[in-house]
Image: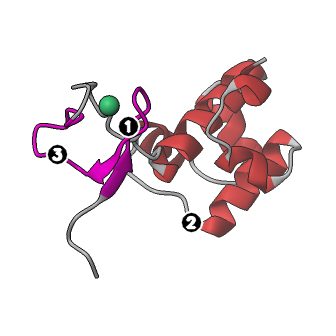
Amino acid sequence: MSERETVRCGTCHLNQFMPRNRHCRRCHSFFELPAPVPDITDVVRSNIIAGRKKRGWIQQELAQSMSVCKSYISKVEKGKVNPSLLSVERFAHAFGIPAYVLLIPTNKENTQ
Ligand SMILES: [Zn+2]
C-alpha cells in the first residue's frame, strides 16, 4: 500500500522513511541494500556440477547413470536448459542424495 519504505538506522536507531540517498537523516550512516536472493536455477546448476565433480564423474558417466544423453548434462551445466523438478529428482537419485539438497544455496554440504 505505502510507496515509502520505513527503515531503522542500525547506528543511531532512528526510524525514518528510506532516504533517497540511502543515508540516515540523523547520523548519515549508509543503509545497505538487502542481499540478493540467490537464483534457484544457479543454485541447482552449481550443485549438480559440484555433485558430479565430487564423485569424479565425467558428464558421460552422469548421463549414463541417469539414462540421458551427455548433451543434456552439458546443457544443464552450461545453464542452457533448466532441469524440471522431475529432472532434479533424477539428478539427486544418481548422486544418491535427497532432491532437496540440490536446492540448498550453500555448496559446503555438496562439494566436500
Ligand atoms: Zn542513523
Which residue is depicted at the point 47% across and 39% down?
Answer: 74
Q: CA distance from mark 3 to mark 2?
A: 42 Å
The answer to whether residue 42 of the structure is visible from this angle is: yes
Q: Earlier in the sequence, mark 1 or mark 2?
A: 1
Q: Which mark is residue 9?
A: 1
**Amino acid under label 1?**
Cys
The residue closer to the viewer here, 55 or 41, is: 41
- Looking at the image, the residue that sits furthest to the right is 96
Where does residue 37 sit, x and y in percent of width and height? Answer: 45, 47
* Residue that label 3 marks: 19
**Amino acid under label 2?**
Ser
Q: Nearer the viewer, mark 3 or mark 2?
A: 3
The residue range painted magenta reads 6-25
The residue closer to the viewer here, 62 or 10, is: 10
Estimate how packed mark 3 is, as few (under 14), some (14 to 19) or many (20 or more) residues with alpha carbons within 10 Å.
some
* Residue that label 2 marks: 84
Q: Check if mark 1's residue and mark 2's residue have beta carbons within 8 Å.
A: no
Answer whether residue 69 is magenta in the image: no
Q: Quadrant of ligand 1?
A: top left
Q: Check if mark 3's residue and mark 2's residue have beta carbons within 8 Å.
A: no
Q: Report whether the residue tagged 1 is closer than 8 Å to ligand 1.
A: yes
Q: Secondary structure at mark 2?
A: loop
The residue closer to the viewer here, 40 or 89, is: 40
Where does residue 62 sit, x and y in percent of width and height? Answer: 70, 38
Which residue is depicted at the point 74% across and 57% down?
Answer: 90
The answer to whether residue 70 of the structure is visible from this angle is: no
Q: Main secondary structure of the magenta part?
A: loop
